[in-house]
Amino acid sequence: MTTQPDAPRICMVGSCNIDLIARVPRLPGPGETLIGTRFQMGFGGKGANQAVMAARLGAKVSVVAKVGRDIFGQDTLKNFEKEGIDTTYFMFDDERFSGVAPISVDEVTGQNSIIIVPGANDGLSPADVRNAAPAIQGAQLVICQLEVPVETTLEAFRVAKEAGVTTILNPAPAAPLPDELLALTDVCAPNEVEAEMLTGVKTDSTEGAEQAARALQARGPKTIVVTLGARGALVVEGDSPAEFVAAEKVQAVDSTGAGDSFVGSLAYALAAGRSLGDAVRMSCAIATRSVLKPGTQTSFPYREEVMGIVG
């Protein structure tokens, strides 16, 4: 996959995992062994997912990430290269295993049980980020999440702000956030559960989601985009009235990774110079498209598949 010389430039500092998915008749109880019906592996980690989505839309993407020196790490590197992603600052950890996420899925109810073992993601350090400063400084926009140490994300945003690079924080999984990190965040993009966990404000209504967004906004970010699942997204920018962006109603096949599809698309659209409202509408439409196929990265569309949306 090739990108145009004037393609939006995005740097992702964050996580890579391998998903190990077993489908079972029901979720096992303590001490119980069950025979599963199907097993599959997939590339995951919020950071990797968001990077791949942005690259598939045509962005020039670089990654700052760390994996174990094992088959999972080698496969992750090959996957990034296949997607046309710059891996100059993709690193191997000689002590830790690659991050993995064993997932059991009840094939009757669709409920799942997930164990995330961060592995080498925990080894991505502020020093690694400083070494990768050229990738951050050369980008128009940097995306981070909370699946690597928070001090590493903080260092990435410090480097970005010193260079005048726009920052997007996807605060997932939700965790206490240092005030400095939020102060360095231009766009904060939680889902409704994360927004509630970060603020203590109920987000089961549009009004509640706006209250949570305003509470986050008061801590630093000028712009908050709260994703609301199948409902769409809520946009709060500065002192302007909140804008609700409705998602198209579809029969979802698999919603796994839809949030990452949204964030990766949002990063692409903002780096490409779209207005915030237009960027959120585009991202909602692409995330909706992703739920029509099974899997995570396997469900993410390529640019040519969504030309009517991307324009």
Image (cartoon, rainbow, N blue to C red):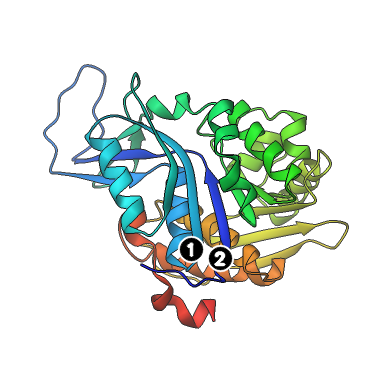
Circle 2 crowding by C-alpha within 10 Å: few under 14, some 14–19, many from 20? many
Q: Is residue 55 visible?
A: yes
Which label was assigned to residue 146? none
Q: Which residue is mark 2?
A: 283
Q: Are marks 2 and 1 in contact (CB under 8 Å)?
A: yes
Does residue 30 lie above or below 139 as drawn? above
Q: CA distance from mark 2 to mark 1?
A: 6 Å
Nearest the eye: 33 or 86: 86
Q: Is residue 49 left or right of residue 273?
A: left
Does residue 246 lie above or below 215 as drawn? below
At x 34%, y 53%, the residue is: 81
Q: Which residue is mark 1?
A: 287
At x 18%, y 21%, the residue is: 32
- Quarter that holds the N terminus: bottom left
Where residue 52 appears, as percent x and y from the top left, is: 42, 56
Where residue 53 appears, as percent x and y from the top left, is: 45, 59
Three-letter amino acid code at the position of disc 1:
Ala
Where residue 235 appears, as percent x and y from the top left, is: 72, 59
Going by the picture, which residue comes out furthest to the right?
239
Does residue 116 lie above or below 25 as drawn? above
Where residue 89 appears, as percent x and y from the top left, is: 46, 41
At x 30%, y 36%, the residue is: 73
